[in-house]
Amino acid sequence: MLRRLYNWTLSLAQSEHALWALAIVAFLESSVFPIPPDILMIPMIIARPNRAFLIAGIALLASVLGGLLGYYIGAGLFDLVGQPLLDFYGKEDAAAQFNERFKDWGAWAVLIAGITPFPFKVITIMSGWTGLSLAVFIISSIIARGLRFYIIALLLWKFGAPIRDFIEKRLGFMFTVFVILLLGGFFLVKYI
């Protein structure tokens, strides 16, 4: 079923309403939808590289707005909607432990989830549930999603289709390694 959903989402990139489809997918992916907007962005940018940064901007705006929906789910609808979503993604057991640490490290959690393959929707819901400052959440979301979408746009704009394989198979890993190195650097500076 997930594969069919992925293929259907990918087919939207060929639609005459691709920008709207991207906005809807980016919005929903930040709160409930399992397929990331990257799968729409990549073929759209390859087909129209002169629109790369417009496409990234639409994904950024819609993703941050969708993140606010996730935040609201966590803050106002957690028992009704948020808990079933966390159950679906297998994150229900970690929720209580996560709540304790999240308020101190919430901005980092939003940044990390926003640029890595970790499901962003889990962090948007947890941000609302734990009461993370809305301003911190919005700023962190803009930075993280902006980095992710604009780096993809820049790579595709500069290198075109040949970089597609790298983005699809390795960019998430590269973002994860970057975050680990960044956090390791902060740890070294703080404790050494």
Image (spheres, helix red, strand yellow):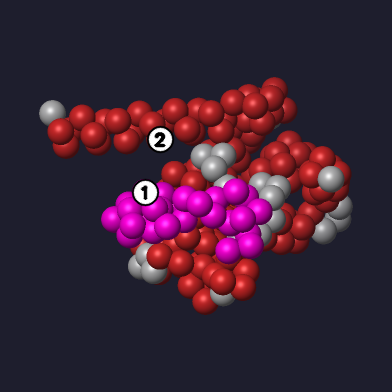
What quarter of the picture does the N terminus occupy? top right
Measured as percent of width and height from the top left, residue 19 is found at: 74, 56
Question: Magenta segment range?
Answer: 83-110
The residue identified by callout 1 is: 108
Residue 140 visible somewhere in the drawing: no
Q: Residues within 10 Å of mark 1 (few under 14, many from 20)?
A: some
Measured as percent of width and height from the top left, residue 26 is found at: 65, 56
Three-letter code, disc 2: Val
What quarter of the picture does the C terminus occupy? top left
Three-letter code, disc 1: Trp
Magenta: main secondary structure? helix
Residue 88 vs 116, above or below: the answer is below
Q: Residues within 10 Å of mark 2 (few under 14, many from 20)?
A: some
Residue visible at 49% across and 33% down in the picture? 175
Q: Are the residues flagged by discs 1 and 2 in contact, CB closer than 8 Å?
A: no
Based on the picture, tell me whether residue 50 belongs to the magenta stretch.
no
> In the structure shown, which secondary structural element does the residue marked by tag 1 occupy?
helix
State how far apart marks 1 and 2 are (Cα): 10 Å
Based on the picture, tell me whether residue 95 belongs to the magenta stretch.
yes
Check residue 100 in the rendering and tell me which mark sits there, or answer none.
none
Closest to the observer: 49 or 69? 69
Residue 113 vs 76, above or below: the answer is above
Check residue 179 in the rendering and tell me which mark sits there, or answer none.
2
Residue 68 vs 8, above or below: the answer is below
